[in-house]
Image (spheres, coloured by chain):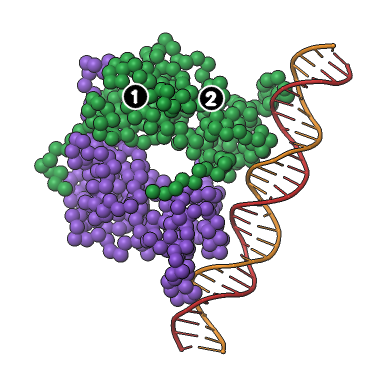
Chain colours: A green, B purple, C orange, D red
Amino acid sequence: MNDDCWVPPTVLLAVDLVILTLRESQLQVLLIERGVAPYRGSLALPGGFLNHDQEDLLTAAHRELDEEAGLGPEELHLEQLGVYGTPGRDPRGRVVSVAYLAVTPRLPEPVAGTDAADAKWTPVAHALSDAAPLAFDHRQILADGVDRAREKLERSALATAFCGPTFTIVELQEVYEAVWGVRLDPRNFYRKVQSVDGFIVPAGPTRRTDGGRPARLFKPGPHTTLHPPMTRPQGPTGKEKT
Amino acid sequence: MNDDCWVPPTVLLAVDLVILTLRESQLQVLLIERGVAPYRGSLALPGGFLNHDQEDLLTAAHRELDEEAGLGPEELHLEQLGVYGTPGRDPRGRVVSVAYLAVTPRLPEPVAGTDAADAKWTPVAHALSDAAPLAFDHRQILADGVDRAREKLERSALATAFCGPTFTIVELQEVYEAVWGVRLDPRNFYRKVQSVDGFIVPAGPTRRTDGGRPARLFKPGPHTTLHPPMTRPQGPTGKEKT
DNA sequence: GCCCTTCTTGTCACAGTGACAATAAGCCTA
DNA sequence: TAGGCTTATTGTCACTGTGACAAGAAGGGC
């Protein structure tokens, strides 16, 4: 009410990154092993505090992305996931963290020799299991990030962000299968994905082999929203209220 | 990097609320007229700083909801919208604001006699127009909130939050029409909305009149996610990339 | 009882989808 | 160089969900 004669409390602001990729047909996330307390030795999402008082949030996220994952501010899908600010989530004090979601194409090697050489790709299924307790509330953040990715696959062209500049339809299907955790019919997927307006466009007459008949190459189309949307099979578990 | 010998910057944390309702068949938002600088006299979203160092974000949002809108922490849909922390968005310093989205049933009167008697419902179309410049970056926050509501109407039972405990199908249709800004066929809407599993259930044999044939009453069903989803007409403007 | 209004139930053609068969195009081997 | 193997691409078919539109049902007012 009377903001005049009252000093509002301050908090520490951090950013955390959920960086997803596809490796060995599995959805994987980039985790680092913490070298300092708290949670020293635990796995955690890449992230850190704001550098200075005037640093923009998105800028900070990109900076961390570069520092901890060696991924420059290229055209890397980076989207705000949410804020996590429950008191007590960080033993160091009142830390409020802004989480971002990033998706990157298959990378041949885990980033190494960089600032944070201890960054390693980990299958999401393992990171979310009880076997690998993450630091802070990072398990929740990761779960939210994966959920977001699953949803966005339905209505946006996010799936192409998992692929390189060109890709085959089967590769695109593998993205959907890995992220959604389902099996899809190649024939129907082929038909469907091509009927979505502006999703993917043929990339030259090029081809690539793989054992059987060579597959056509495609690249991301002009549209980022999908019409009609890709529909996820298996009537999602109709959650009950309350 | 070396978190040890370095003091991370602190910021001021605030919450802002986008409170939507339906009045006179229009989507309206609750705005307050600011009584103090900065932006004194301008319209703004309800909101404020954290009360104390240990206050939870959601708690703070509910507190503001009560203080500025007189809406208790009843079963009011309150959902995190995003973080707005661009440096310079608030002349008072580095203020990072967490925005929440709330939806409430038709209220007979603008909240009055309360703490913030200057709160008033404003049609969203007007609040987003150039005619009524909002304080800070609240226009952007409002736009994001409305977008979110539009999307959630498709796949969640959010529409029922605009209605009272019981409602007719026509009333529900008015929600969709107002939020989406479209006209829907009553016959198809009637069929569709009833075929969605667990969306709405009949509320006793009760009825209510309105001039013509009395309409059946319904209440929210057990499911909060819609299958199949309500589809928004008019192929959304396929946005171009870049 | 008749008209007017609004709610509710049908009908019909058509697009989109899941299930599944058949063909095409390379490589590999004999 | 003719199979044979593997994988990609093209079809087919039945069925569901949807948009467009007509017809019937249930009150209120005169």
- Mark 1: which secondary structure? loop
Q: Chain of mark 1?
A: A
Q: Chain of mark 2?
A: A
The numbered mark, 2 or 1, whose residue comes first in the sequence reads: 2
Q: Nearer the viewer, residue A107 or B214?
A: B214
Task: List x then y, in percent, for residue D8.
Answer: 69, 28
Q: Residue at x 27, y 40 (%)?
A: B57
Q: Which residue is mark 2?
A: A26
Q: Residue at x 35, y 45 (%)?
A: B79
Task: List x then y, in percent, for residue C26.
Answer: 75, 20
Q: Which numbered tag is attached to residue A210?
A: none
Q: Nearer the viewer, residue A1 or B89?
A: A1
Instruction: Count up the numbered dots.
Output: 2
- Mark 2: which secondary structure? strand
Instruction: Examine the rendering and report whether any part of residue B232 can be seen.
Output: no
Q: Is residue A229 above or below residue A43?
A: below
Task: List x then y, in percent, for residue B186.
Answer: 53, 64
Q: Mark 1 and mark 2 in contact (Cβ < 8 Å)?
A: no
Task: List x then y, in percent, for residue A197.
Answer: 60, 41
Q: Which residue is mark 1?
A: A135
Query: Would residue B108 be found to the left or right of residue B147 on screen?
Result: left
Q: Residue at x 46, y 21 (%)?
A: A122
Q: Residues within 10 Å of mark 2 (few under 14, many from 20)?
A: some
The alpha-carbon separation of the residues under discs 2 and 1 comes to 23 Å
Disc 2 marks which amino acid?
Answer: Gln
Q: Is residue C23 above or below residue B145?
A: above
